[in-house]
Amino acid sequence: MISAEKEMVGNEMEDSVLSTNRKLFVTNLRYGKAHLQQFRAEPKPGDLIEIFRFFNSHWALYVGNGYVIHLAPPGENSEAGARTGLGVVKRQLLVEVVGNCFYKVNNHLDHLYKPRPIKEMLRSGNKMVGTEMEHSDLSRTCEHFVTELRYGKARSRQIYPKGSS
């Protein structure tokens, strides 16, 4: 390992605060291969996936075989600012949706609500693919979309006024 480090001294590498290059570099030095084990459990069908983007979190429902269903925001390739407008429900590979961001399984409302049967979640999600829906980062509509699929209730971790839920 130390000889590998010495060989890398003085080499220029692309780096970005928003990317995972540093972690991949160190992992490569330690294990001899660039493998990024993010702080996440392996998802199971029906799991909610929280993707940590620069200014906000994006949410998806894991459907299996590496795919998720999510409400893609307008201008989804832009991570700057709060996007509002019509989004489209998509079924995409999780790695494509995540890009260089971190993610984790986050079934954060399981303590409050019983998840719907997985077949119902997936059936409902697949029926929605291609549908345009209002999207707003500020209103957390992508989180509401996937919690509706998982629990049958559009919820988020936002604080609700007393008496509403």
Image (tube, rainbow, N blue to C red):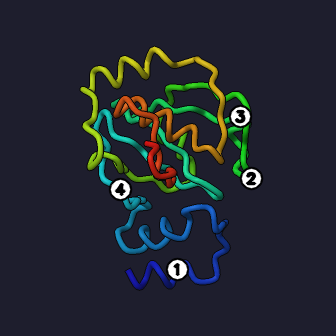
Residue identified by numbered label 4: 40
Which amino acid type is marked by label 3?
Pro
Q: Earlier in the sequence, mark 3 or mark 1?
A: 1
Which amino acid type is marked by label 1?
Glu
Secondary structure beneath disc 2? Answer: loop
Residue 140, image quadrant: top right
Which amino acid type is marked by label 2?
Ala
Q: Earlier in the sequence, mark 2 or mark 3?
A: 3
Q: Is residue 134 left or right of residue 3?
A: right
Secondary structure beneath disc 4? Answer: loop
The x, y position of residue 13, in whole percent, is: 65, 69
Name the foreground residue: 36 vs 108: 108
Q: CA distance from mark 3 to mark 4?
A: 27 Å
Marks 4 and 2: which is nearer the front? 2
Total numbered badges shown on the rendered structure = 4
Q: CA distance from mark 3 to mark 1?
A: 45 Å
The x, y position of residue 62, in whole percent, is: 38, 35
Q: Are the residues flagged by discs 2 and 3 in contact, CB closer than 8 Å?
A: no
Residue identified by numbered label 1: 7
Q: Is residue 2 left or right of residue 110?
A: right
Residue identified by numbered label 2: 80
Residue identified by numbered label 3: 74
